[in-house]
Amino acid sequence: MADVIVINKIDSADFDDINEVRENVRMINPKAQIIEAASPLFVDHPEMIYGKKVLVVEDGPTLTHGEMTYGAGIVAAEKYGCADLVDPRPWAAGEIKQTYEKYPEIGTLLPAMGYSSKQIKDLEKTINSAECDSVIIATPIDLRRLIKINKPACQVRYELQEIGVPTIADVLKNFGKKSSKK
């Protein structure tokens, strides 16, 4: 069993759901320490979102295999007041088009499905063909390092922010003390 469990996104998840997770942890693993955390969103150029028609590029596997209906890019688009989400499907190229055929529930998000040269070229073509004011990149890697985007683009990221005590540093410090006593 785990020694430590992190309950994340307590700033955005439903309060009752968080309590249910806490109760389940205490019931199944009562000795585990619980760390609560939030995942605040950071955008390097939020002015590229407000009042704009934006194309949102999300982490593809999160949308497909993870069955998520939205990710950090949509959260940023809403938080920073985009005028409209641009549907990339009319401009989808190659493997991106195939992804939409296989996973139609993705909807108006543009999935970055991988980083092979073909996948990157298809993504670049799709982004650059789309009629939008700016691009929100919500992928683990900053796509601006891999492709040339012909319109303004901003990067979205999350950071783990511990709420209260114990913190991860506290737990690791104590874990180190326990290990050295053995």
Image: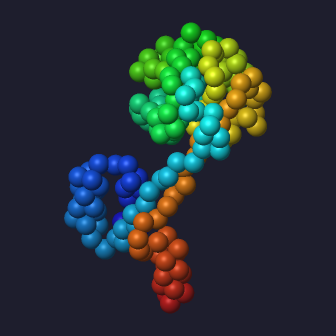
As rendered, which of 168 and 163 lies closer to the eye? 163
Residue at 77%, 27% (x, y): give it: 148
Any part of residue 111 in sight:
no
Q: Residue lying farthest bottom? A: 181
Q: How many marks?
A: 0
Q: Is residue 15 above or below residue 136?
A: below
Q: Quadrant of residue 176?
A: bottom right
Question: Horizontally, is 170 left or right of 120 in the view?
Answer: left
Specify the color scheme. Answer: rainbow
- Residue at x-position 48% and y-position 53%: 39
Q: Residue 140 in the image: state x and y as whole percent.
A: 61, 42
Residue placed at 56% from the left, 33% from the top? 50
- In the picture, measured across the screen, residue 120 lies left or right of residue 65, that is right
The percent coordinates of residue 141 (x first, y second) are: 66, 41
Above/below status of 182 relative to 161? below
Q: Nearer the viewer, residue 59 or 78?
A: 78
Residue shown at the point (51%, 25%) measured from the top left: 83
Q: Where is residue 8 drawn, in percent x and y?
A: 41, 56
Nearer to me, 166 or 102: 166
- For the N terminus, the image quarter is bottom left
Identify the image quadrant of residue 154: top right
Answer whether residue 33 is visible to the viewer in this image: yes
Residue placed farthest to the front in the image?
51
State whether residue 145 is above or below residue 172.
Answer: above
